[in-house]
Amino acid sequence: MIALDPWAWAALGVAAVVIGISKTALPGSNILAIALFATVLPARVSTAAMLLLLIVGDVFALLAYRRHAHWPTILRLAPAVVVGLLAGFAFLALAGDGVVRRAIGVILLLMIAITLWRRWRQSRPDALTREPGRGLVLAGVYGGLGGFSTMVANAGGPVMSMYFLATRTPVQVFLGTAAWFFAIINLVKVPFLAGIGLFSPPVLLMDAVLAPCVVVGALVGLAIAKRLDQRLFDRLVIALTIVGALYLLL
């Protein structure tokens, strides 16, 4: 087992609950979990440890929303996502923990900036006329960035959430498509990270301890999905994630 202080275990437990909630209620909100994991653990270890917990959350997301996926959207994104995944794997295999740690911080800040920029655009009177369409260029940009960020930091959720918003995807289709998309991507990532030795026995044991927290989070997400004040929650997630990202950079 990885030796951690009590506060570190508490932070990882909260992060695991957030992972579960992000899978069943708030796609993309796991940026807070990413910041907590990368703060407590070495950067590359945090990426591997989070991946297995995300897969646990994927099971619940598929059980809840599997029938609502839009497969043409997934196929449209696939080529760019594969390129992004390969680029991210090369970076992860070659870079040291310090570089990866700072990269995670930059990616988190970039995801927050994209989210805030998108919300600002949507609040403008001309938002409908300025909204990008469902083109291959849009899929290429978001898919490539999503593939890279999910391989390096498991941070593809916010990127793909912005893509689904940009293409005006209905809520149920949004959740169903995201569920299948990330379930497939996360399974694809496993042999890559295993190949560079990131799934050590201590990491697997730690994930076994944290997995029940993901289950709790997923069940909470299902219960509050229709009642949650999403605006307040998003503001809290963004504020806490900015603090976590700045900590990683400094």
Image (cartoon, rainbow, N blue to C red):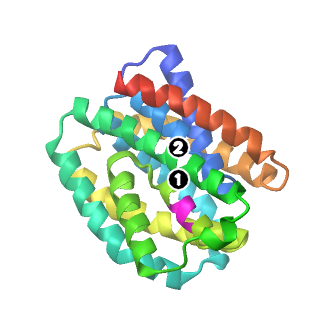
Hey, which residue is sitting farthest front in the picture? 126
Residue named by callout 1: 158
- Mark 2 element type: helix
- Mark 1 element type: helix
C-alpha separation, residue under disc 1 versus residue under disc 2 = 8 Å
Locate residue 188 relative to residue 10 in the image: left or right.
Answer: left
Q: Position of residue 212 (x, y in %)?
A: 59, 41
Q: Position of residue 8 (x, y in %)?
A: 48, 20
Q: Amino acid at mark 1?
A: Pro
User: Is the Cβ of the residue at disc 1 closer than 8 Å to that at disc 2?
Assistant: yes
Which residue range is magenta in the image? 160-164
Q: Amino acid at mark 2?
A: Ile
Dominant SS in magenta? helix
Residue 201 appears in the rendering: no
Q: Callout 1: 10 Å neighbours few (<14), some, many (20+)?
A: many
Choose top left, top right, bottom left or bottom right for residue 80.
bottom left
Residue named by callout 2: 112
Q: Position of residue 20 (x, y in %)?
A: 61, 47
Which mark lies nearer to you, 1 or 2? 2
Q: Quadrant of the N terminus?
A: top left
- Earlier-in-chain disc, 1 versus 2: 2
Q: Quadrant of the C terminus?
A: top left
Q: Position of residue 62 (x, y in %)?
A: 60, 67
User: In the image shown, does 61 or 250 lie closer to the viewer?
Assistant: 250
Q: Tell whether position 240 is magenta.
A: no
